[in-house]
Each structure stands twice: as C-alpha cells, then as structure tokens.
Amino acid sequence: MTYQIDTIHQTEYPEVVELWETSVRATHEFLQEEDIIYFKPLILNEYLKAVELSCVRDSETQIIGFSGVAEGNLEMLFVHPAHAGKGIGKTLLNHALVNQNVTKVDVNEQNAKALEFYLKNGFEVISRSEIDGTGKPYPILHLELTN
C-alpha cells in the first residue's frame, strides 16, 4: 500500500500524544508508568512544537503514524500498534531522509525492534550514552546514516 505524507496541525497534538502513548506502551516495555506520566506533558507542551511533524492518516483521516525532525535528526517516529509492520514507519523514514535531510537518530538501547529497523535502513551505531536526554537511566544509542 502507498501512504501519503500529511502535516499535523497544533489542534491535533492531543491525538498525536494519544498515539505516542499507545505506541510507547506497546514497544517500550522497559519504561515505568511514572516515566510515561513524566514524558506525556513534555511531548504535548514542548517536544511537538520543537520539531517539524509529518504523519500518515487512515481512510478516516485519523493519524496512524507520525515523525518529528529537527536539524537533520529524526527526533521521533511512532506508529500505532494496530498498523505496525505495514510500511508506515518506512514511509515516514523515507520522507524524513529525502525531504528533511535526516542523517541521525537516537534509539533507546532496550528498544530492539526500533534499532533493527534503523540498522536495516542504512543507519549504524556511532556512540552510546548511559542516560537519556532527561537524565533517566535508559541508555541511548546514537545512529548515523551510512549510505
């Protein structure tokens, strides 16, 4: 299936945060409930405003996947679990690579599926941090595009 890239309006941020939370709960088993509670308002009130957002919508115009890019970094890419494995993430990544000049992405070390996805798509691990950007004890792998 071919997916179209669309923009996200600020009025849709609550919908995006819902998708983020659903996706994180399905893919980030290592996070604690208090981490999700901590990050949720940051996503809504700060992080979404700091990136160029793109999305894929279903036939009812609901957002089923989104990405956020800032300064050549893919800062976020999330797909609703009900739509995972259907090429939505690949579509969003390709858009980021071709149209937004993405060359870098950070991945939680414990998120093996995300790491595998980026490695399959031409990224390689260049370094590792013991903590995430907020100082939490979740190691981060820093990846760069190699091809």
Image: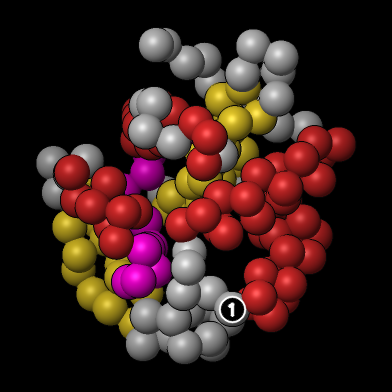
114 relative to 78 in the view: left or right: left
- Residue 56 is situated, as x and y percent measured from the top left of the image, at 56, 25
- Residue 107 is situated, as x and y percent measured from the top left of the image, at 37, 63
Q: Is residue 42 magenta?
A: no
Q: Is residue 106 magenta?
A: yes
Magenta-highlighted residues: 99-111
Q: Which residue is mark 1?
A: 32
Residue at the image point whose x is 44% and y is 36% from the top: 84
- Residue 74 is situated, as x and y percent measured from the top left of the image, at 44, 50
- Identify the colour scheme used: secondary structure
Front residue (pair 64, 8): 64
- Residue 115 is situated, as x and y percent measured from the top left of the image, at 28, 57
- Mark 1: give few (<14), some (14-19) or many (20+) Cα within 10 Å: few
Residue at the image point whose x is 61% and y is 39% from the top: 53
**Which quadrant holds the C terminus?**
top left
- Judge whether 109 appears above or below 131 on screen: above
How many numbered marks, from 0 up? Answer: 1
- Judge whether 97 appears above or below 4 on screen: below
Quadrant of res 135 = bottom right
- Judge whether 36 appears above or below 34 on screen: above
Residue type pointed to by label 1:
Gln
Residue at the image point whose x is 71% and y is 18% from the top: 61
